[in-house]
Image: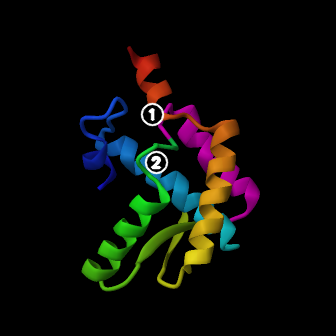
Amino acid sequence: CLEMDSLGTNVELQHGEAVATDMSFMTVLSNVLGHLSDSDRDRILGILHTCGLPTYHPVLTRDFFKVAMEDRIKNSLGMRLPLPVGMGKARMFNDVTDEQFEATFVKWESLRKHSTVSVAKSKARAE
């Protein structure tokens, strides 16, 4: 899991920070899949940002995500990804392709350069 893999790095995560990072990625995934509008995507990311929660972490790489998804599929009876489909609404998805995950990483990395809080920034601000 993300918070465990970040232990011992200079950017360790608390559980809630790992959840927020995952939420940001899943929000962008839902947007890429066409289930969440750009405005709702930006609103969700903005709420996380306003709360000072990290929406990006360097441990969440393509390779990390691929291994995590393989484990999830093996141990959770399928993908079973909870994705936002509107403000306060979510659905479970099981049919996301590798190409859609890749498109999400490209979009997520692009968005984080302009509007996200990294864990390193939020930790420095707290100290």
User: At x 45% / y 73%, what residue is drawn?
Assistant: 81
Quarter containing the N terminus: bottom left
Q: Helix, strand, or loop for circle 2?
A: helix
Q: Is residue 125 left or right of residue 72?
A: right
Q: Is residue 9 magenta?
A: no
Q: In the rendering, which numbered label is found on residue 86?
A: none
Q: Earlier in the sequence, mark 1 or mark 2?
A: 2
Colour logic: rainbow
> Around disc 1, counting alpha carbons within 10 Å, would you say few (fewer than 14), some (14 to 19), or many (20 or more)?
many
Residue 85 visible in the displayed image: no
Q: Helix, strand, or loop for circle 1?
A: helix
Q: Amino acid at mark 1?
A: Val
Residue that carries the numbered disc 1 in the rendered image: 119
Is the magenta region chiefly helix, strand or loop?
helix
Q: Position of residue 103 (x, y in %)?
A: 65, 66
Q: Position of residue 74 (x, y in %)?
A: 28, 81
Q: Magenta stretch?
A: 36-54
User: At x 45% / y 33%, what residue is drawn?
Assistant: 119
Q: Is residue 88 left or right of residue 18?
A: right
> Around disc 2, counting alpha carbons within 10 Å, would you say few (fewer than 14), some (14 to 19), or many (20 or more)?
many
Residue sitting at the far front? 63
Q: Amino acid at mark 2?
A: Thr
- Residue closest to the eye, 51 or 104: 104
Quarter containing the C terminus: top left
Residue that carries the numbered disc 2 in the rendered image: 21
Rendered position, 3 above or below 100? above
User: At x 30% / y 38%, what residue is drawn?
Assistant: 14
